[in-house]
Image (cartoon, helix red, strand yellow):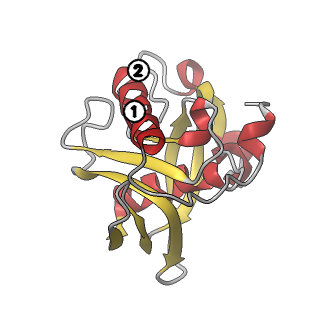
Amino acid sequence: MGDLLLLQRAAEVAHFNTPGLRALVSDMQDTMQHANGAGLAAPQIGVSLRVVIFGFERNERYPDAPAVPPTVLVNPVLTPLGTDEEAGWEGCLSVPGMRGLVPRFARLRYQGFDARGKAIDRTVDGFHARVVQHEVDHLDGILYPMRIRDLTKFGFQDVLFPGQEPQDD
């Protein structure tokens, strides 16, 4: 947090299925796996491109979360489906050790492309919708603390949830 790259809009990907894009996605997957995260955006590893990855079959850090299909999403567009919101606790690799209660749209449609340029178009809700919104926010220079409405629900993980493992997304 504080890195100017994380506070700017990332550039659109112009070319798909390139060695550079494949290498970026591989680096992101390695980073996310190492951190046992649910998602990661390219700006989080110093690359200002509109690329996010997310998904897991089962994640020990989110034992109650349903599976989210492993996804590489390039040049995403999010469309909220309704105005209903759900509040949920979030953390972030870019804001280590902190957690906050963040409102997110309960249901949305996301569109974009995979790394090869194949179109993706999904309608999702719940945790899947939350993860996508969190990661795509990174592409627009938004960190989750900027979404928190009640700052009494923002603090250090070990103070808010004593005895629990850190859960940075």
The single residue placed furthest to the bottom in the displayed view is 82
**What's the amino acid at mark 1?**
Gly
Q: Residue 164 carries which label?
A: 2
> What residue sits right under mark 1 in the picture?
37
SS under mark 2: loop
Residue 107, above or below 147:
below
Q: In this view, does 120 lie to the left or right of 2?
A: left
**What's the amino acid at mark 2?**
Gln
Answer with the quarter of the image where residue 111 lies. bottom left
Residue 74, above or below 155:
below
Q: In this view, does 35 lie to the left or right of 42?
A: left
Q: Which mark is residue 140?
A: none
Residue under the image location 39 percent in, 41 percent down: 22
Q: Depth check: 134 or 138 in front? A: 138
Residue 93 in the image: x percent, y percent?
55, 29
Residue 23 in the image: x percent, y percent?
42, 34
Residue 138, above or below 81:
above
Task: Sort mark 1 into few (<14), some (14-19) or many (20+) by Cα contacts within 10 Å.
Answer: many
Residue 52 in the image: x percent, y percent?
47, 49
Residue under the image location 44 percent in, 52 percent down: 131
> Real-space Cα distance between discs 1 and 2?
16 Å
Q: Is residue 101 left or right of residue 9?
A: left
The single residue placed furthest to the left in the displayed view is 57
Residue 38, above or below 147:
above
Residue 129 in the image: x percent, y percent?
41, 62
Residue under the image location 32 percent in, 52 percent down: 71
